[in-house]
Amino acid sequence: MRQAMQHALLILALAVIVGGPELALASEPDWKAVEAALGKSGQAQPGGVFRIGMPRTDLAVTVKGVPVKAGFALGSYAAFKPVGDQVMVMGDLVLLDQEVPAVMAGLFKGGLEVTAVHNHLNDMSPHVMYMHYGGHGDAVKLATALRQALSASGTPLGGGGAAAAPAAGPGLDTKQIEQALGRTGRAMDGGVFQVTVPRAEVITEMGVQLLPAMGVTTVMNFQPTANGKAAITGDFVLIDKEVNAVARILVQHGIDVTALHNHGLMDTPRLFYMHFWANDDPVKLAQWLKAALGQTNSANP
């Protein structure tokens, strides 16, 4: 299956190279049909990517005893990018342990590939795994296959079954966080504040450029907790020589490195994803995250 996917991506990349940008934009998919097939609405992103979020609002998860919001650490998604007259899709699925085997089988049945299965955080209750996947082909067919695979999970799709967003609770001084990080962010559901930082270099998969909205960007999420503190999680997107430099800074400042692994299989340069967790003063955490970012080839603010 992997060889077939590699071959298809190579053909798509060559089609864009030979046909030019006009070919890549000539047959943009019917995104409304894709939304209907998957049962969730999405948003157009820079570079022609269409991203659909599927947060696990049905789950009540704690990390080290801290209740976490779906937008903080439980965000499944699918990112579609037109390539020639087809699309490539990649994303991440948040699954309970018992959901993993059936969802994986469903992805294979629908012609998708699994690129990684692992934890992102530790001390989670209930325990949650993260399944990364990819595929190529007709956008509606891919969305239909993804929905069929997810029917083996409790992922809320189809406009029903999703719990209301949790109350935001105490707020965050987001201006201070942005000042400490030297980066701007955005407010998410449930009082979560997110800052994303793309890498400076071009990232490709079999010659097709992967854009930040497809998951190849550093993400730093802040969620307010008790006593003026905030929990942080997310992942640094790193190349090999940056891994230990970033890990040392995080550990030295009391930020737990909770996972280190691949998300994709054929990315260039080869990327590693470092997940983290801490619960402390949000401005101090932002300062330490900035120090870690300084060890990476990240795009300028």
Image (tube, helix red, strand yellow):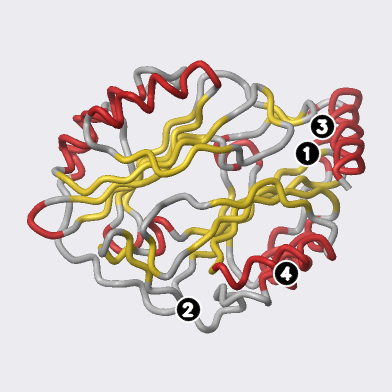
Do the numbered discs 4 and 2 sit on residues whose CB atoms are within 8 Å? no
Secondary structure beneath dot 3 equals helix
Secondary structure beneath dot 2 equals loop
Gap between marks 1 and 4, in whole Å?
A: 29 Å
Viewer-side residue, 65 vs 108 = 65
Residue, far bottom: 161
Is residue 289 placed above or below 102 in the rendered structure?
above
Secondary structure beneath dot 1 equals helix
Do the numbered discs 1 and 2 sit on residues whose CB atoms are within 8 Å? no
Gap between marks 1 and 2, in whole Å?
A: 34 Å
Percent from the top left, x then y, of residue 179? 20, 30
Residue at mark 4: 149
Q: Could you tell me the amino acid type at mark 2?
A: Ala
Report crowding for label 1: few under 14, some 14 to 19, many 20 or more residues within 10 A (C-alpha).
some
> Of the numbered discs in the image, which one, if any, rests on residue 25?
1
Residue at the location (28% across, 22% down)?
291
Residue at mark 3: 22
Do the numbered discs 1 and 3 sit on residues whose CB atoms are within 8 Å? yes
Q: Quadrant of residue 278?
A: top left
